[in-house]
Image (cartoon, rainbow, N blue to C red):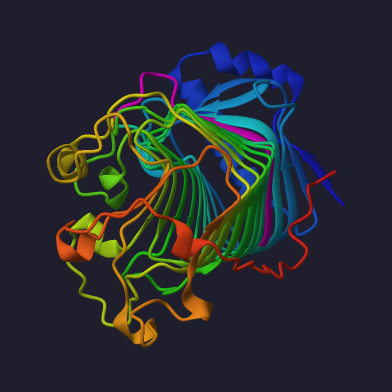
């Protein structure tokens, strides 16, 4: 494997030179990415480097981009004037990005698209000022990828999702920290994912598993979320107006929206003071559905063996969902840890009006958990806090192909 040191130690002094020298660094970095042969190791030394435009890697195979360590090699895009992402990788194979930090991009921190076997390890993406709608949407953003590994990474301050995987297959997200994002970790329209041993804290919503309409990959599912610490996700929602994630109430631990075959277990879901776990259809967003092939209902969800704690306070989320809890549901401070909107797809029901076994929502063996079916499809007329009919099991098999290498 060919090793290409992008910057020598002698070049570090350039980081403190005037703007024209900073442009020289930008050109050298991009030139090395363009000229890298398949199989190269591209090394970035320790230092803070001020960059002004997107770095891109296109059509390469078996490339390792390696810094000197998280918080040692820092690529800062504050005041970015060209492009939106910090680093963009597309139409590639066997790519590893590790041991570096990307800061203050105009748009997404690191975006990878149409990459097979992509690994992020010990990478931080952050916006260093107060969380704000002007921050970039996504920290790590693999989309339409296969075999995705996000390991020991950190995301702070994204105005949509810190660690996001969309329209992808065979995904592992583990050992990560997501803080002060709108969504800490999000799996969207993706198949076969495992999310485990992560900490999601002080976001608006800790972990989201969504299927949304109008996307190329229409349906996700077969997602396991386990052994995570999901706590104190009560941060005000700062998503730009019109974003679907802008509907997530502050105080959401886990939200499962309009997707199927999801198993949530062995998590600590503590002090998320609106919804410890919400299982909802797309109808709850109140957005119109124009995609005729889209299925807006959640199904085959299994929530078990989680530990729930919340403060004895009223529903913390604002907006229309907050008003619903205040004026229609009137839970006061006795907000359920787990709630299900109860909107059913009639095509999946049996003669008793309940879901057939292959579609059932199952909730069992959780510690300290209270529950409510909101009966949202019937204008909340028959809210039920009896979880007995959901006492079943519906385990998920993910069948993940061995994920991307870590670059070790």
30 in relation to 181, above or below: below
Residue at image x 74%, y 25%?
Answer: 8
- What is the x, y in percent for residue 197? 68, 40
Does residue 27 appear in this view? yes
Residue range corresponding to the magenta coloring:
117-133
Residue at image x 78%, y 63%?
Answer: 402
Is 227 magenta? The answer is no
216 in relation to 310, above or below: below
Could you say which is closer to the camera, residue 391 or residue 278? Answer: 391
- What is the x, y in percent for residue 403? 74, 59
- What is the x, y in percent for residue 138? 43, 43
Residue at image x 21%, y 71%?
Answer: 289
Left/right placement of residue 58 relative to residue 383 reads right
Does residue 155 appear in this view? no
194 in relation to 318, above or below: below
Left/right placement of residue 389 relative to residue 262 reads left
Left/right placement of residue 229 relative to residue 309 reads right
């Amino acid at each position: 494997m060919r090793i290409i040191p992008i910057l020598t130690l002698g070049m570090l002094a350039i980081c403190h030179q005037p703007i024209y020298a900073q442009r020289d660094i930008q050109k050298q970095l991009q030139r090395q990415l363009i000229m890298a042969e398949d199989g190269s190791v591209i090394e970035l030394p320790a230092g803070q480097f001020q960059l002004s435009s997107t770095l891109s890697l296109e059509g390469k195979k078996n490339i390792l981009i390696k810094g000197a360590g998280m918080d040692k090699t820092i690529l800062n895009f504050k005041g970015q004037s060209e492009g939106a992402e910090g680093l963009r990788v597309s139409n590639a194979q066997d790519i590893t990005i590790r041991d570096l930090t990307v800061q203050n991009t105009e748009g997404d921190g690191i975006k990878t698209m149409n990459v097979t076997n992509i690994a992020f390890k010990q990478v931080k993406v952050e916006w260093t000022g107060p969380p704000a709608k002007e921050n970039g949407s996504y920290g790590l953003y693999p989309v339409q990828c296969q075999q995705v590994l996000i390991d020991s990474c950190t995301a702070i301050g994204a105005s949509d999702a810190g660690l996001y995987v969309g329209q992808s297959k065979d995904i592992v997200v583990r050992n990560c920290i997501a803080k002060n994002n709108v969504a800490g970790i999000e799996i969207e329209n993706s198949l076969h994912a495992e999310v485990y041993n992560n900490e999601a804290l002080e976001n608006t919503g800790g972990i989201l598993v969504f299927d949304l309409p109008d996307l190329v990959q229409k349906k996700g599912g077969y997602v396991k979320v386990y052994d995570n610490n999901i706590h104190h996700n009560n941060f005000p929602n700062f998503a730009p107006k019109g974003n679907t994630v802008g509907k997530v109430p502050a105080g959401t631990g886990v939200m499962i929206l309009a997707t199927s075959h999801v198993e949530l277990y062995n998590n600590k879901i503590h002090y998320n003071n609106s919804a410890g776990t919400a299982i909802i259809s797309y109808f709850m967003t109140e957005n119109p559905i124009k995609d005729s092939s889209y299925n807006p209902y959640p199904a085959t969800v299994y929530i078990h063996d989680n530990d729930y704690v919340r403060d004895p306070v009223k529903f913390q989320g604002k907006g229309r969902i907050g008003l619903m809890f205040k004026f229609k549901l009137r839970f006061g401070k006795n907000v359920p840890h787990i709630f299900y909107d109860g909107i059913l797809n009639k095509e999946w029901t049996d003669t008793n009006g309940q879901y057939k076994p292959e579609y059932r929502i199952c909730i069992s063996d959780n510690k300290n958990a209270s529950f409510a079916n909101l009966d949202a499809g019937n204008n909340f007329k028959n809210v039920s806090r009896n979880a007995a009919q959901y006492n079943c099991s519906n385990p998920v098999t993910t069948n993940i192909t061995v994920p991307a290498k870590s670059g070790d």
